[in-house]
Image (cartoon, helix red, strand yellow):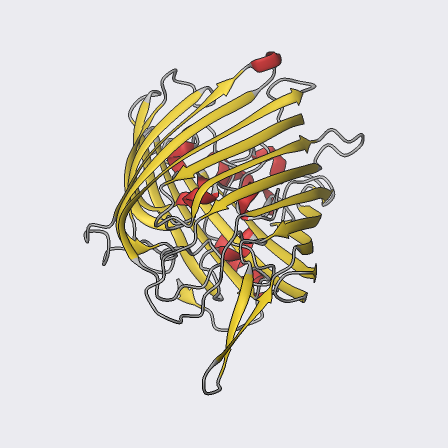
C-alpha cells in the first residue's frame, strides 16, 4: 500500500491553494525553481542526465554536471508535467473536450551517500493539478483520467502528499514513518501508476477496492525482505490515518481512532523461465462512513447515504512476461490481471477483476515505447439511502476496456493516444423540476466512448 511495498531501499521507483490559475507554464516554472534545491522520483544513474537533447533522459539535462554531482552525493530528483486532452465522443452524461494537467516533483535523499548513516531514505513529494477533467462525463464510477485526481480531486491546488522517512536496520528489515502517498501500492509491471505513463483509467492503475482509502495520510509500518533481495520478495505491514488528506498535515485527525490497517506481500516468479510477479494484500478500516464517503477516487455523488462502521477488503494482482528477449531487462510482452473483494458495504463494490496485455520496447526501432490493452468489470453495490426523495442515481454493474500506445518522442517526452469504451455504473441521471408537485425526470446513460491524448514532459 505505501512506499514500503516497493524496495525503496534498493530500487527507487521509476498545500498551498492555487485558485483557478491556468498553470500550463507556471507549474513548470514553480517546479523548476524548486529543483534548484533538491531531487526526484527515480534515482537514475547520474550518466543518464547527460547527453544531447535527443538522447538524455530529462529535458534540462545535467545542469553542467551539478545534477550528476548531487546524485552521487545522494540527492536526486525528477520533475514532470503531464497534460491531457480528453473527450466523451458518444454516450455518457456529457460530450465535449476538456484540457487538464498535473505537475509533480519527488525528492529522494540517501543518508549513506550523503555521508550521514547507512540505510536511511527521505522522500518528499510535491504535486499540483489544474483545469477540469472529464471524469463526471462518462457516467462511470471509475475515473477515466486517474491522473487528475492528484493531489486532490476537483480542485486546482499544489499540495505535499508525502514527507516520509524509511530506515533499514539490515538488508532484511526496516521501518517507515511520515505522511505517505498510498498510491505506490498494488504495483504491477504493465498496469500501475497515477495515470501519467501507462493506462489512463483508474481501474488499470490500482485495484479499485482500495478506492475508499485516503491517497495521502500519516502512517507508519514495517518492511520485511525475507531473502535480502527486495526484487525477489517484500512484505509490509502498515497503519495509516483513515481521515488523511493531501492538503492537510493530518495531525488533527491521526489520533481520533479512524484507522486503516494493511498488509501486502509481493514476490517474483519464474514461470516459463521468464519474469513475473504475484501480489496479495488485505485492509481493515475502522472508520465510520457511508458507502460513498472518503471516496475521492470514485465518481459518485453522495446524498443521504446510510452510515456503517468498519470495512474490509482483499486484493490480488499478477504480471507475467510471455516474451522477454533478455530476462530482467524490463522489456517484452506479457499479461496482467487484478482481483478485488470487499464487504460491499460501505465499499460501493462487492468485487472487481481486470485482465490485459502489456508491452515494453518490443516495436522495432522503438525501444522506449509502451502499449497496453485491458478489460475490467465491477460488481457494484447500490447504497442504502436514508432520505425519501434524494437526488439518486440508480447504479448497475460497470465494465469497460481501454487501449493506449505510449510513443516516446524523446526519452523525456512521451505522447500517448488512448481510447476507452465504458458501460458505466450510473444507469440513469435524475433531475427534479421545480413544479408543484415536483416532476422527476430520468434519463438513461448510454455506453461512453472516450478518446484522449496525453503529453508527459520529464524535466
Question: At 57% across and 37% down in the image, what residue appears?
Answer: 191
Q: Residue furthest bottom?
A: 436
Q: Is residue 342 left or right of residue 140?
A: left
Give the total number of marks visible in the rendering: 0
> Residue 455, percent across and down?
67, 53
> Residue 423, percent across and down?
61, 51
Is residue 183 visible in the rendered image? The answer is: no
Give the camera-side residue of 450 and 351.
351
Vertical comparison of 282 with 442: above or below: above
Give the camera-side residue of 271 and 111.
271
Where residue 236 sits, quadrant-wise, is top left
Vertical comparison of 359 with 437: above or below: above
Q: Is residue 390 left or right of residue 192?
A: left
Question: At 47% across and 22% down in the image, what residue appears?
Answer: 231
Where residue 112 sits, quadrant-wise, is top left
Give the camera-side residue of 275 and 242.
242
Q: Quadrant of the N terminus?
A: top left
Q: Is residue 199 left or right of residue 341?
A: right
> Residue 379, percent across and down?
49, 44
Q: Residue furthest front?
A: 437
Question: At 51% across and 17% down in the image, what residue appears?
Answer: 269
Is residue 274 visible in the rendered image? The answer is: yes
Give the camera-side residue of 204 and 395.
395
Vertical comparison of 382 with 15: above or below: above
Q: Residue furthest top?
A: 273
Amino acid at each position: 500500500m505505501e512506499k514500503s511495498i516497493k524496495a525503496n531501499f534498493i530500487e527507487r521507483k521509476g498545500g498551498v491553494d492555487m485558485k483557478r490559475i491556468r498553470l500550463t507554464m507556471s507549474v513548470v516554472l514553480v517546479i523548476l525553481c524548486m529543483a534548484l534545491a533538491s531531487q526526484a522520483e527515480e534515482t537514475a544513474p547520474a550518466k543518464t542526465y547527460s547527453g544531447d537533447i535527443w538522447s538524455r533522459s530529462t529535458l534540462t539535462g545535467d545542469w553542467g554536471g551539478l545534477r550528476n554531482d548531487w546524485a552521487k552525493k545522494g540527492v536526486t530528483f525528477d520533475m514532470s508535467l503531464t497534460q491531457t486532452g480528453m473527450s466523451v465522443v458518444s454516450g455518457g452524461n456529457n460530450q465535449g473536450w476538456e484540457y487538464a494537467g498535473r505537475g509533480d516533483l519527488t525528492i529522494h535523499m540517501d543518508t549513506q551517500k550523503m555521508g550521514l548513516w547507512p540505510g536511511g531514505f527521505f522522500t518528499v513529494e510535491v504535486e499540483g493539478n489544474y483545469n477540469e477533467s472529464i471524469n463526471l462525463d462518462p457516467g462511470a464510477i471509475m475515473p477515466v483520467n486517474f491522473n487528475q485526481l492528484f493531489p486532490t480531486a476537483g480542485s486546482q491546488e499544489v499540495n505535499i502528499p508525502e514527507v516520509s522517512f524509511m530506515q533499514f536496520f539490515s538488508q532484511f528489515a526496516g521501518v517507515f514513518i511520515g505522511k505517505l502517498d498510498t498510491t505506490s501500492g498494488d504495483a504491477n509491471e504493465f498496469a500501475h501508476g497515477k495515470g501519467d505513463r501507462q493506462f489512463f483509467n483508474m481501474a488499470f492503475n490500482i485495484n479499485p477496492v482500495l478506492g475508499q482509502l485516503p491517497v495521502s495520510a500519516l502512517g507508519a509500518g514495517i518492511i520485511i525482505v525475507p531473502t535480502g533481495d527486495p526484487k525477489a520478495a517484500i512484505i509490509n505491514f502498515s497503519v495509516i490515518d483513515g481521515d488523511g488528506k493531501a492538503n492537510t498535515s493530518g495531525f488533527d485527525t491521526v489520533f481520533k481512532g479512524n484507522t486503516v490497517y494493511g498488509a501486502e506481500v509481493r514476490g517474483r516468479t519464474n514461470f516459463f523461465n521468464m519474469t513475473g510477479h504475484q501480489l496479495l494484500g488485505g485492509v481493515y478500516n475502522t472508520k465510520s462512513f457511508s458507502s460513498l464517503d472518503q471516496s475521492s477516487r470514485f465518481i459518485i455523488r453522495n446524498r443521504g447515504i446510510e452510515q456503517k462502521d468498519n470495512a474490509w477488503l482483499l486484493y490480488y494482482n499478477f504480471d507475467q512476461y510471455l516474451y522477454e528477449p533478455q530476462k530482467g531487462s524490463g522489456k517484452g510482452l506479457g499479461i496482467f490481471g487484478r482481483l478485488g473483494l470487499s464487504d460491499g458495504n460501505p465499499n460501493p463494490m462487492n468485487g472487481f477483476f481486470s485482465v490485459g496485455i502489456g508491452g515494453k520496447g518490443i516495436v522495432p526501432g522503438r525501444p522506449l515505447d509502451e502499449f497496453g490493452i485491458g478489460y475490467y468489470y465491477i460488481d457494484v453495490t447500490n447504497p442504502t439511502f436514508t432520505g425519501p426523495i434524494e437526488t439518486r442515481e440508480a447504479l448497475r454493474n460497470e465494465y469497460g476496456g481501454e487501449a493506449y500506445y505510449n510513443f516516446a518522442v524523446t526519452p523525456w517526452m512521451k505522447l500517448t493516444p488512448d481510447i476507452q469504451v465504458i458501460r458505466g455504473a450510473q444507469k440513469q441521471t435524475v433531475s427534479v423540476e421545480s413544479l408543484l408537485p415536483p416532476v422527476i425526470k430520468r434519463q438513461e446513460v448510454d455506453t461512453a466512448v472516450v478518446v484522449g491524448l496525453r503529453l508527459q514532459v520529464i524535466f
